Amino acid sequence: MTDPTITTEEAVVTVGDIVVSDHWVVTPSGTAPIAGARFDIVDHTYKKAKHPAWAIVLAVVLFPIGLLFLLVKKEALYGVLEVTVAAEGLHYAAQIPPRDPMRVVRIRDDVNRARSLAAKG
């Protein structure tokens, strides 16, 4: 039987599909008390600079002066952030793709907030 407070407690932090309230950690693989839960984050992201398609087209069409368009590069963020939670009878890992550098910062902040909730117990 499920504890009725689990369904009525409001989420404080949501990281991917990990939901953290004042007293519980809820994941797709189960629910556990927040007290003593451990949250970890591993950054598997990397930046890659690419030439935009329009710059390549203009470089070809406007050759030789168009080669200056090859100086234009766009940085993109690839990879995933892996957030894991380990608690009493629960171990879950969420992989969250970053959309932009600010999202990476927000996810790190959310994990730190979840850690502080776990420390308070």
Image (cartoon, rainbow, N blue to C red):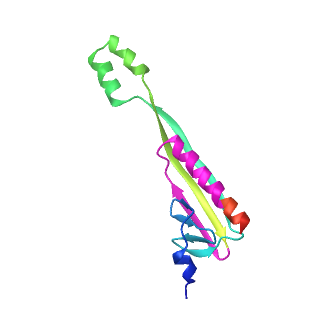
Q: Nearer the viewer, residue 54 or 40?
A: 40
Query: Is residue 50 rendered to the left or right of residue 21?
Result: left
Q: Position of residue 47 (x, y in %)?
A: 52, 37
Q: Residue at x 62, y 70 (%)?
A: 91
Quadrant of res 21:
bottom right
Q: Quadrant of the C terminus?
A: bottom right
Q: Is residue 73 magenta?
A: no
Count numbered badges in the picture: 0
Q: Give me the residue at 67% from left, 63% from top.
A: 117
In this view, 82 is above or below 26: above
Q: Residue furthest left?
A: 61
**Which sits in the foreground, 87 or 77?**
87
Position in image of residue 55 (x %, y %):
35, 24
The residue that appears at 62% across and 68% down in the rendered structure is: 22
Q: For residue 96: magenta? A: yes
Point out the residue furthest to the top here.
65
Task: Magenta stretch: give its range.
Answer: 88-114
Picture coordinates of residue 49, whole percent (x, y): 48, 32
Name the image quarter holding the N terminus: bottom right
Q: Residue at 50%, 63% (x, y): give it.
A: 17
- Residue 10 relative to residue 60: left or right: right
